[in-house]
Image (cartoon, helix red, strand yellow):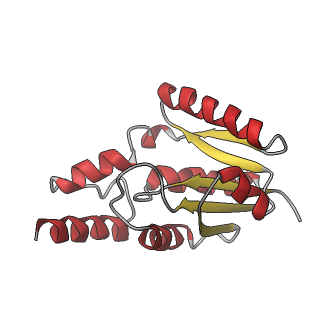
Amino acid sequence: MGSRAVYPGSFDPIHNGHIDIATRAARIFDIVIVGVYDLPKKKLLFDVDERLEMAKQALYPIHNIQVAKFSGFTVDYAREVGATVLVRGLRVFSDFEFEFRMGLANKRLAAEIETVSIMTDEKHIAISSSTIREIAELGGDVSSMVPPFVAEALVRRFQEQRR
């Protein structure tokens, strides 16, 4: 079957940092499944189907990346799709502490699944979905942080909310 990894996240919205991590993971693993989590414990700008479609469009050119939505425990989803690895991205030192604790919790839930963290490229270190949403909400230019269709979706969403 080959190596199979899940790269889980809310991707609200997907940005160039996410795309970088997924692309690099695809060079390491035979199949990377980008799992769009349906109900994270945070306020969402886009619903799960919108986030799924944006991720599919952003990652379409990479032949060994699949994009799917999931719910429940990430490790249960990984088992369901036959993955033995969870991919996580690291930007700043504070990410490490969070990801370390999450990795330990996942290991307790599913000892057979490993967590592999990939450090972001330097040019993406300041990018986060929440920062992108804040900039876009105030009418700022996020075109250097997201694909063009995501920038357009952000403009549309905030215009809708202002009406």
Q: Residue furthest left?
A: 163
Q: Is residue 74 left or right of residue 36?
A: right
Give residue 80's position: percent from left, percent from top: 76, 63
Q: Is residue 84 left or right of residue 49?
A: right
Between 57 and 81, the one lying in front of the other is: 81
Q: Is residue 3 above or below residue 156?
A: above
Q: Quadrant of residue 32?
A: bottom right
Give residue 134's position: percent from left, percent from top: 24, 48
For the N terminus, the image quarter is bottom right
For the C terminus, the image quarter is bottom left
Q: Residue furthest right?
A: 1
- Can you see residue 41? yes
Give residue 12's position: percent from left, percent from top: 41, 57
Give residue 79's position: percent from left, percent from top: 78, 57
Residue at 43% from the left image edge and 56% from the top image edge: 15
Number of disc labels: 0
Between 26 and 1, the one lying in front of the other is: 1
